[in-house]
Every structure is written in C-alpha cells, then in structure tokens.
Image: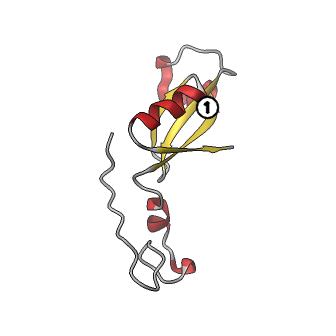
C-alpha cells in the first residue's frame, strides 16, 4: 500500500504544509497533513456502510466494524476487529491513530 501524495520538507519559517501561518492553510493542504504515513482507525456500525457496500456486508446493522482511513479521509479498509486493523496497517509501516 503506497500513497502518492508528496509532502515537502518545511522551509525556514514555514509550517511544513506550504504556509507560514496555519490560518492560511487551505482545506486541500490540511487534508494532506500526515500523508502518507498516518492512518486513522474508527469504529463504525455495519448500518453506516450498508449504503456503500450493499449486499457485500451481510451483518446485523448494529455490528461494530473498524474502518481504516488515510490521513485525508479516504477509506482504505474495513475490518471486524480493532486489533487486526492496527496490526494490518503496521505491516505496511503506517502509523495508526484511534479516532472516537
């Protein structure tokens, strides 16, 4: 799993996101923060994914699942176990963080 987003090293006096003041940070640049090394894991219910996954998920609506997202919000995977989600992303040298 590789992310094609490039992150440039900060110049002196800059934040690392191409701006010298975080208030000037665009939504696009903010979405790239943490790319490509950080992913987040959050709990979702099977019902939340039913519209997107349709019949691929044959689970009760209240079944907890764990979605893995890139730092920019793009969902990368859905697993049925939090520990497996964290272990899986670490196998790709990514740093998982939990989101509540």
Give whichever of 3, 53 is nearer the camera: 3
| Residue at left offset 47%, top offset 61% | 33
Give whichever of 87, 49 is nearer the camera: 87
Locate residue 76: give its quadrant. top left
Residue 40 placement (x, y as % from top left): 54, 44
| Residue at left offset 52%, top offset 80% | 24
Residue 81 placement (x, y as % from top left): 58, 24
| Residue at left offset 47%, top offset 53% | 72
| Residue at left offset 39%, top offset 52% | 36
Pointer 1: what residue? Answer: 48
Check the picture and name the quadrant holding the C terminus: top right
Check the picture and name the quadrant holding the N terminus: top left
Residue 53 placement (x, y as % from top left): 48, 26
Residue 55 placement (x, y as % from top left): 48, 17
Total numbered labels: 1
Give whichever of 88, 61 is nearer the camera: 88
Residue 9 vs 96, above or below: the answer is below
Question: Which color mode does the image show?
Answer: secondary structure
Residue 28 vs 59, above or below: the answer is below
- Secondary structure of the residue carrying tag 1 is helix
Give whichever of 57, 96 is nearer the camera: 96
Q: Is residue 43 shown left or right of residue 30?
A: right
Residue 10 vs 65, above or below: the answer is below
Q: Is residue 37 shown left or right of residue 86?
A: left
Give the class, few, some or many, for how many residues have Cα within 10 Å of label 1's Cα (few <14, many ≥20). some
Q: Is residue 41 shown left or right of residue 62?
A: left
């Amino acid at each position: 799993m590789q992310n094609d987003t490039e992150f440039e090293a900060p110049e002196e006096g800059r934040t690392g996101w191409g701006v010298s003041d975080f208030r000037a940070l665009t939504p696009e640049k903010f979405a790239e923060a943490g790319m490509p090394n950080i992913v987040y894991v959050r709990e979702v219910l099977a019902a939340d994914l039913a519209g997107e996954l349709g019949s691929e998920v044959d689970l009760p609506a209240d079944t907890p699942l764990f979605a893995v997202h890139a730092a920019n919000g793009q969902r990368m995977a859905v697993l049925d176990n939090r520990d497996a989600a964290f272990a899986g992303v670490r196998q790709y040298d990514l740093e998982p963080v939990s989101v509540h």
